[in-house]
Image (cartoon, rainbow, N blue to C red):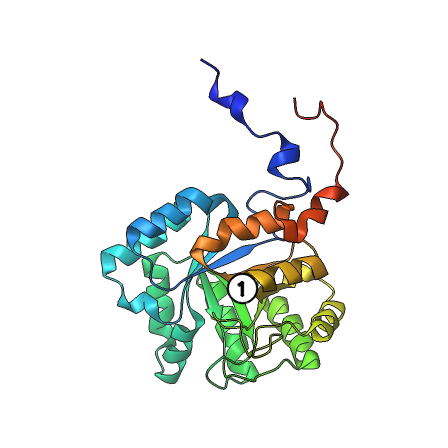
Amino acid sequence: MEQFATKDWHPALADPTGTRESKPRRKGQTMVIDKGLGLHAYQDMINAAGAYIDVIKLGFGTSVLYPKELLLRKVELARQAGIHIMPGGTLLEIAIVKDRTDEFFRLVSAYGFTAVEVSDGTIEMNRNLRSSLIIKGIDAGLTVVTEYGKKMSGSRIEIDELVKTVEIDTGLGASYVTIEARESGVGVGIFDEQGECNKNELHLIARSVANSTQLMWEAPQKSQQAELLRALGSDLNIGNVAPDEVLSLEALRRGLRSDTFQFGLEKRYSFNEGE
């Protein structure tokens, strides 16, 4: 019987671009938003697409709603697959309002989360508090990501403010700054009420923040993902990806869909390569 190893796809087919990095990777990260998957669906997602997921965010404040055993199991499965896992930033915002941030960080660590999101999408947060929370998360041994932007419909990006936020947050040790687009991708940040991207704003941000690895772009819709990748490259960090869209996004990154087919034309293979 033919050995399983001989059934590996040729690299020209598996990744026509010839550039996709394996985990752990600094660029081209994919962050999945889990809004309440059951254990079987969650396991299926990791089994099918774990190699292409870098971060799982348990959306909003849903972390507190799971049975304890289920939450622990979700965290464990993510860690076993080499995937960072974090509660949604809204939960930390609630902890701030309720003056329970110390309890928040204690429980995040106790449950085994590996990352935390510092955001102010719903509340107002001054610079000193934001900085102290970033430092507190790092001191707790967590990977810290931050978020820029408000969740209310019609909120837009102030470029100068974004640039300053990225500079300070990453300077304090945050891994990257996420640009808010909510889970809908409509009427927030760079997306209008129809989910269309403001291309001028997109390119202005890209020119202003020179290091693309410092940004994670929330882009839940396939059309948005394709447009961002075509505009700024296949190794863009993309967040708020639905669990059942991970492979679809990975195919976009590798030029395995018609929307980004041209990505694969930039790399030429010989017929004998990899054989």
Q: Where in the figure is residue 194, as x and y percent of width and height?
A: 57, 76
Is 210 above or below relative to 122? above
Please tell me whether mark 1 sits on a helix, a strand or a loop. Answer: loop
Q: Nearer the viewer, residue 182 or 145?
A: 182
Q: Is residue 14 left or right of residue 90?
A: right
User: Which quarter of the rendering shows the N terminus?
Assistant: top left
Q: In which image quadrant can residue 232 be found?
A: bottom right
Q: In the image, is residue 207 above or below residue 10? A: below
* Residue 234 image position (x, y, % from top left): 66, 53
Q: Quadrant of residue 75?
A: bottom left
Q: Is residue 105 above or below residue 83?
A: below
Along the viewing direction, whichever of 118 and 255 lies nearer the viewer: 255
Whether residue 134 is visible to the viewer of this picture, yes or no, is yes
**Residue extending furthest toward the front:** 258
Looking at this view, is 136 or 229 the one in front? Answer: 229
Q: Residue at x 53, y 62 (%)?
A: 239
Residue holding disc 1: 221
Amino acid type assigned to the residue bearing label 1 in the image: Gln
Q: Residue at x 38, y 73 (%)?
A: 91
Where residue 187 sits, quadrant-wise, is: bottom right
Q: Residue at left 60%, top 58%?
A: 237
Q: Position of residue 26 (x, y in %)?
A: 61, 52
- Would residue 185 be found to the left or right of residue 59 on screen? right
Give coordinates of residue 173: x percent, y percent.
58, 64
Q: Residue at x 27, y 63 (%)?
A: 66
